Image: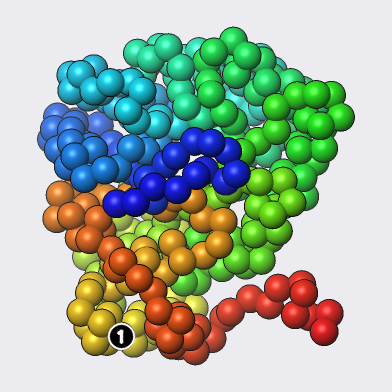
């Protein structure tokens, strides 16, 4: 696993990170989470991502317990969390100054840490003025509760506004956007974010490289019982798999499997290497649920040749056009 700078910041993150650990509670998942983190850490993964909303805070508690038990040096890894949905009360969600500060304090106590490396705004909040958000993020950094801040699911315009506000009031701008990115979701990461990377140095940390498991081919013959789409609360995924669009995507996935076979890797390894080839992508977050998946994903293709990239583009037929090309 190699390392890259997070955007144009000085923070070095592994090109693969572990995200959404322990979304489910229970002993078996906790011991599995520990195994996954240990294997990842020993293979050079230094990035672990969580959120206050995951399993209603239990994900952070588990992550904190594992780190404590392992006794790893705090300076040797990067912990990120996301703030937005903290609780039921009106004041326990959103990006008000109150919730950013209280939410992060809550996260830190669950994680049993003095600070996180990056605190993310888990979506934009139309009810909070941008200046308030940027001031609060600057405050938690100055207080030593976080090292950097970033955005998640923000539009390019919103990120640009945060940057402008930061420059206007001498505050701290965001360093990173977390965005969904895979074969069937390309526009933002390939067209909008590279522009932000060059202009203001914002890097991309991407999630869902396997489109919730769709790309592994496990849904090719319907929805297996133990899969995510069969879980409670994932009705939308089941519907997506069974939709007409889903069927078309599954047909393309079959072709991609053949290509992966030819290259001597798995479909998942190909998909992750494909995500990492994109400019401005600092790290790809993996959502693995067992050690086999993790070891497979860690063995990514070292090099994507231009030929392979062209072949995948032709196969997908959805390459976004950058603004520069459309002007010509």
Residue at 22%, 74% in the rendered image: 265
Residue with the most extreme right position: 168
- Rendering coords of residue 208 (x, y %): 42, 56
- Rendering coords of residue 247 (x, y %): 41, 81
Residue at 42%, 41% in the rendered image: 13
| 191 and 219: which is toward the camera | 191
Q: Is residue 96 above or below residue 291?
A: above
Q: How many marks?
A: 1
Which of the 4 image quadrants contains residue 300? Answer: bottom left
Q: Quadrant of the C terminus?
A: bottom right
Q: Residues within 10 Å of mark 1 (few under 14, many from 20)?
A: some
Residue at 55%, 50% in the rendered image: 204
| 250 and 321: which is toward the camera | 321
Q: Is residue 88 above or below residue 12?
A: above
Q: From where the camera sits, is residue 248 visible?
A: no
- Rendering coords of residue 282 (x, y %): 49, 50
Disc 1, SS: helix
Q: Is residue 318 above or below residue 299?
A: below
Q: Is residue 19 left or right of residue 90?
A: left
Residue located beneath label 1 in the image? 259
Q: From where the camera sits, is residue 258 visible?
A: yes
Q: Is residue 258 left or right of residue 328?
A: left
- Rendering coords of residue 299 (x, y %): 22, 61
Q: Is residue 20 left or right of residue 264?
A: right
What colour-coding does the image apply? rainbow
Q: Is residue 24 above or below residue 265?
A: above
Residue at 31%, 66% in the rendered image: 302
Residue with the most extreme front position: 10
């Amino acid at each position: 696993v190699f390392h890259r700078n997070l955007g144009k910041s000085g923070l070095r993150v592994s090109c693969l990170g572990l995200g959404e650990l322990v979304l489910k509670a229970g002993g078996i998942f906790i011991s599995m989470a520990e195994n996954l983190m240990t294997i990842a850490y020993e293979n050079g993964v230094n990035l672990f991502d969580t959120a206050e909303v995951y399993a209603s805070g239990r994900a952070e508690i588990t992550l904190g317990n594992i780190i404590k038990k392992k006794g790893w040096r705090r300076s040797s890894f990067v912990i990120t969390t996301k703030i937005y949905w903290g609780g039921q009360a009106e004041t326990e969600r959103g990006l008000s100054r109150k919730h950013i500060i209280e939410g992060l304090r809550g996260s830190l106590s669950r994680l049993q840490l003095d600070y996180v490396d990056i605190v993310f705004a888990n979506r934009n909040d139309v009810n909070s003025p941008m200046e308030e958000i940027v001031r609060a993020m600057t405050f938690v950094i100055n207080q030593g509760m976080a090292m950097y801040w970033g955005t998640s699911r923000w539009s390019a315009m919103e990120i640009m506004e945060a940057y402008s506000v930061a420059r206007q009031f001498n505050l701290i701008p965001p360093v990173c956007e977390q965005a969904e990115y895979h074969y069937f979701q390309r526009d933002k990461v390939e067209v909008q974010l590279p522009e932000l990377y060059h202009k203001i140095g914002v890097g991309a940390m991407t999630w869902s490289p396997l489109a919730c498991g769709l790309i592994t081919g496990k849904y090719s013959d319907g929805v297996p019982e133990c899969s995510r789409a069969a879980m409670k609360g994932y009705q939308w995924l089941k519907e997506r798999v069974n939709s007409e669009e889903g069927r078309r995507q599954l047909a393309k996935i079959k072709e991609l499997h053949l290509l992966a076979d030819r290259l001597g890797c798995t479909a998942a390894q190909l998909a992750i290497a494909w995500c990492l080839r994109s400019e401005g992508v600092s790290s790809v977050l993996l959502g693995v649920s067992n050690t086999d998946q993790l070891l497979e994903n860690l063995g990514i293709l070292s090099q994507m040749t231009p030929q392979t990239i062209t072949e995948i583009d032709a196969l997908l037929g959805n390459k976004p056009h950058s603004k520069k090309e459309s002007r010509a």
